[in-house]
Amino acid sequence: MSRGFVYNILFRTGIVLSVYIRMSLLKPFSKLPGLNAANILLVECEEQFQKSLADALVEETAVTVYVRLAKSLPLPKENEESRPRIDLVVFIINLTSELSFQSAEASLKYLDPGYLLGKVCFMVTNARNASVPTERLDAVRKLAAALHCPLLFAEDQTPDGVTYATKRLLSILKVSAGLVPMATALYLSSLTSCTVPPDIDQPSFD
Amino acid sequence: MCLCLTECFEYFSNVEMAAQLNLSGHPDSGLPSLTDQSMSSRTSNRSLRVAEKERRKNEAEDPSVLALQYFYNVEAGTPVSGNDEVERNLVLVEQVAYRNGLSPEAISIMLEFAMSLRMGHSLCPRVLKCLIPVTVVPQEAVVRGVSWLGVGKIPVSTQVLFIKWVLTVFDMIDAKDQLRAIYGFIFSFVSEENLCPFICHLLYLLTSKQIVRVFRVRKLLELQSKLGRQPFLLNLLSLYKVFCPELVTFSIPSQSKSVFKNHNMPWKSALFAVQKRNGSQVASSISLASASKDGTNRRKRKRHHLEIPVLRSVVNKEPQTETRRRLVPLVQIQSVAELLENMDHIELPAQMGSLLGSSLALQYLDCVQDESALLRLNFWLGYALHEELLFCGDGASQNSEESLQFLNKLLSTQHFLQEGFSSSEAFLYKFLNVWDGSLLRPQILGLLSNIPVIPSSQIERLLFKPLMQLFFTSSVFFKCGLIECLNNMLLKWLIWHSVYALEDDLDISRNSHTSINMTLSGFKDSVMGLVDFVGRLASSGLQLEGCHSLLLSFILDFYTMVCDTFLKYGLPLVVMPPPGVFYPALFATDPVSVDRLAFIMYRYKVNLTSAKIQEKLTDQAFHISRQTFHEFNNYTVYMVNCLWNSKMFQPGMGVQLGEELLLKSNVPQYWTSFDLVHHPAFMSYAIDFHQKCWPGKKDIDLDSIKHSKPWSWYLEYLFSQGYDGLALFVQSNIRARQGNGQQGDSLST
């Protein structure tokens, strides 16, 4: 049954043509879902973590997971007909690069607002790196909080970290693809959406 | 090292210099210098000496040794620009430094060269940057370096660089007594604005009780009024306040103990790299090294980045009894008896981190309510955790094995002391916000369960928000782990309360280790917050995981403790489980969950009854809200109706369904579906019982069990299978039997 493995490198050039803007708005409910299948779209500007995540994601046997990779949004117009309904959009942000964050922020404009009802999540790598300015992490947090999306942290350098990040994405994906009875994407996102923590450097207990 | 030196002077006075400049690439230069006087006995192995001789000869031609010689001898005022010799030699030294690190002697020479500005100040920063020690940094060199600061010709940026370097290698300085002796001199630099943050950090590391004086406090306060409430000044002042509270009278926010800023990353990574590289050579050279025990220990420690320091006293030499006012270093204490004898004049070790490794030291820490010891330990710990775990310099290279051992050690220490450190608490609050949920999970959850009571106003943002997100996006095993961790946390809070409530009835402020005061109602709020939070996690978690029975088991563990808060832990608080937990447990398909729920309900009843009795006896007793009684009654009535009376859907109950809908479902006798005979969890027992009771009967009629005789036999049979919780529940709630025994009566409190 399983081992469905669609590996589409959708958009590599990174050039955003204004013509595409209206046409390629990614919509969550414009197509019918597949039977016992889930589609996940990984958006990462640097294309580093994507690959290993995708390899691990398609190992899932309980449901057929189709992984699609993109460098940024919008997706090209050509494949629009054949493209299945995307159940979860994951923006992977490498905190050590400013570009990565900016690219994700720019891509968000090409998402239908319907996705923000629990079908988008952010995955951040290198958050514990000393060279990361704290402002950048704060900015990502603010973005995720403003969109009411979950913000996941991943240890992309170790195999264990990749495995666990995959598991977490799968658990969200299953809900957002409607495969978990009694749970919807909106319900899960109301439980997991990110909030901006106030400055916890000096918790004043007095 | 010492051995080599003396011998070389003896035999090869002509290459004296080279011997002194023994570079660290050399395997046995890793030995600590100047400490092992006993080792220099002339009778040591002759062949070793011959081998040394050979090596020295080779080294005399080693270009890097010659380079160091150059810097040792170079005349003051030699021009830098266009001087190829300097450039060449400096490159050589840098190569050695970045590859293997520099030996103590080399550090002395290079530091002296840089700080004395013999060739102007343009080379200074470059030299300072390559001062990467392989073993230790001689204290004398640092003291000389500090003394050059006073000359006043060095540019400020270089001065800052020097102090930063001292801070980085502070733990590697072989002794601190002389540095402590020039505390006043170092203190004088506080007034220089650019140096101030770093000087404060250095002073923080050097401060002892005798050093805190009125004029110093006054100076710091004066600076504070000039510069504002800077964290570095506050940190130092808070340490002063700990030592001499009478001198620092104004209040310092208790949680402003954030560590000093990290300003040593370039050295740190180089140092780490050098130590790692040397680590691999140690094994091969160990046979040659004939090292003292101390030597090997220390070398081993250097290999690890995150290891607990070896317990050492502040002064490396024999204690001079005259001057030191009979302070006994902790390292010399061998037994509890000795510890008790010297309780009042124990000298804390140079590195507080070493306390973690010694159980005697922990005993001392536990019984002496010495704020300064705890503060210093917390400072070190906070720094270590922050640097090595929270913000590891280069992500991947972080050695998880080391972190694992370190955290395990920390956990066992906290276990021993039966309390958490405030620095590990602060670390956790930050770490939870960037945690992926899997890295070092057992250790992190272990540390988390040790955190002390958090005021209810803070608990939401510090703990619940980050945990909630992790919980709902993680696997069912993480969910189980987190519930267990919160269970342990609650247990510790309750134990803490029962201990302190005994000591003092009204004011249960915490012991002197932290300055948080907490009233009984504040404590109750926090516990209530925690229980509610777990209730929220549990209800939604069960829903998302399809009532996973493992998760349910952990959740019931939690409520097994919650139901007994009043009787077992003396906390006047009863919180019922939410419906999202009660009903899944009641309708669970495994009999164990139903049995445990029955036990929990039984304990709730016992607790509530005794609370009510107590309320009647003593007027001022606590008040349990009517809502709690109402909830309890509802649950109990429903449970009895469902399991015993076969009346699942009664009007006014928790679960209600329309009559027509139930008829439409075509389930025959739907109202009996969850009684003790037909409940999916007990059905197999009912069938088994039926076969045993009427062995001849072919067609099974479970309803026949409900007649009065077989019913009591069936109950007996069920209870004999080990379902004690169920037995207790039935005994306590079902009193009167009417007619044919099918009818039970629920007793409501």
Image (spheres, coloured by chain):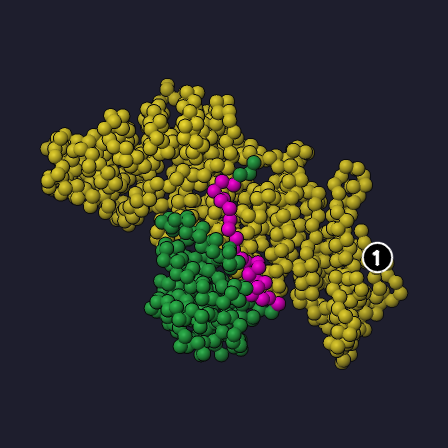
The magenta-colored residue range is A182-203
Please name the residue shown 10% across and 40% down the image.
Answer: B82
Quick one: which residue is furthest to the right in this view?
A: B739
Q: Main secondary structure of the magenta part?
A: loop
Please name the residue shown 78% across and 45% down the image.
Answer: B612
Q: Is residue B348 left or right of residue B6?
A: right
Please, what is the three-letter code of the amino acid marked with disc 1? Arg
Q: Is residue B503 left or right of residue B661?
A: left
Chain that the image shows in yellow: B
Q: Is residue A182 above or below residue A81?
A: above
Give me the chain letter of mark 1: B
Q: Residue B451 in the image: state x and y as whole percent.
A: 54, 44
Chain that the image shows in green: A
Q: Is residue B359 above or below residue B207?
A: below
Q: Residue A154 in the image: state x and y as whole percent.
A: 44, 58
Task: Please tell me in which quadrant of the rendered image residue B324 appears.
Answer: top left
Label 1 belongs to which residue? B735
Q: Residue A56 in the image: state x and y as whole percent.
A: 43, 67
Q: In terms of secondary structure, where does tag 1 sit?
A: loop
Q: A69 or B411, which is in the foreground?
A: A69
Residue A144 visible within the image: yes
Task: Please tell me in which quadrant of the rendered image residue B494 appears.
Answer: top right
* Residue B153 falls inside the magenta stretch: no
Label 1 crowd bin: few (<14), some (14–19), many (20+), radius 10 Å: few
Q: Is residue A182 above or below residue B609?
A: below
**Quarter of the image containing the N terminus of chain B?**
top left
Residue B64 visible within the image: no
Please name the residue shown 37% across and 41% down the image.
Answer: B262
Q: B501 or B533, which is in the foreground?
A: B533
Q: Residue B49 in the image: state x and y as whole percent.
A: 18, 38
Please name the residue shown 26% across and 35% down the image.
Answer: B158
Task: Please tell me in which quadrant of the rendered image residue B584 appears.
Answer: bottom right
